[in-house]
Image (spheres, helix red, strand yellow):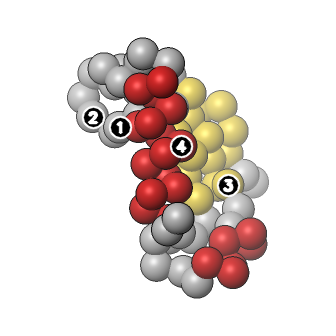
């Protein structure tokens, strides 16, 4: 599984399974803003370096609940 399929499975597919695909799983107007901001671009980095990626911020319901200092 490549990184694109993994992110899709974690976001859109999990929203579909929980019958929430109309409000979760994508960054779109009207959708819940539950997301993380990562320290690196996981789509362009080598797969063996993914484990070194840090979470810079977490947003739940459109509000930041964590920001790395």
Frontmost of labels 4 and 2 is: 4
Q: Is residue 42 left or right of residue 47?
A: left
| Residue of label 3 | 55
| Residue of label 1 | 26
Q: Answer above or below: position of 49 versus 69.
A: below
Q: Earlier in the sequence, mark 3 or mark 4?
A: 4
Q: 61 or 5: nearer the eye?
A: 5
| Residue of label 2 | 28
The residue shown at (69%, 81%) is: 48
Labelled pair 1, 2 in contact (Cβ < 8 Å): yes
Q: Position of residue 66 (x, y in %)?
A: 69, 39
Q: Answer above or below: position of 21 versus 27.
A: above
Q: Earlier in the sequence, mark 2 or mark 3?
A: 2
Q: 41 or 9: nearer the eye?
A: 9
Q: Furthest residue to the top?
A: 19
Q: Earlier in the sequence, mark 4 or mark 1?
A: 4
Gap between marks 1 and 2, in whole Å? 6 Å
Q: Is residue 8 left or right of residue 69?
A: left
Q: 12 or 45: nearer the eye?
A: 12
Gap between marks 4 and 1, in whole Å? 11 Å
Q: Is residue 24 left or right of residue 28?
A: right
| Residue of label 4 | 10
Badge 2 element: loop
Q: Position of residue 14 (x, y in %)?
A: 50, 32
Frontmost of labels 1 and 2 is: 1
């Amino acid at each position: 599984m490549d990184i694109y399929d993994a992110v899709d499975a974690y976001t859109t597919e999990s929203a579909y399974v929980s019958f929430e695909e109309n409000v979760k799983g994508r960054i779109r107007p009207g959708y819940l803003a539950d997301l993380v901001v990562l320290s690196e671009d996981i789509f362009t980095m080598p797969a063996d370096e993914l484990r070194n990626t840090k979470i810079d911020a977490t947003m739940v319901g459109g509000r930041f609940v964590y920001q790395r200092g």
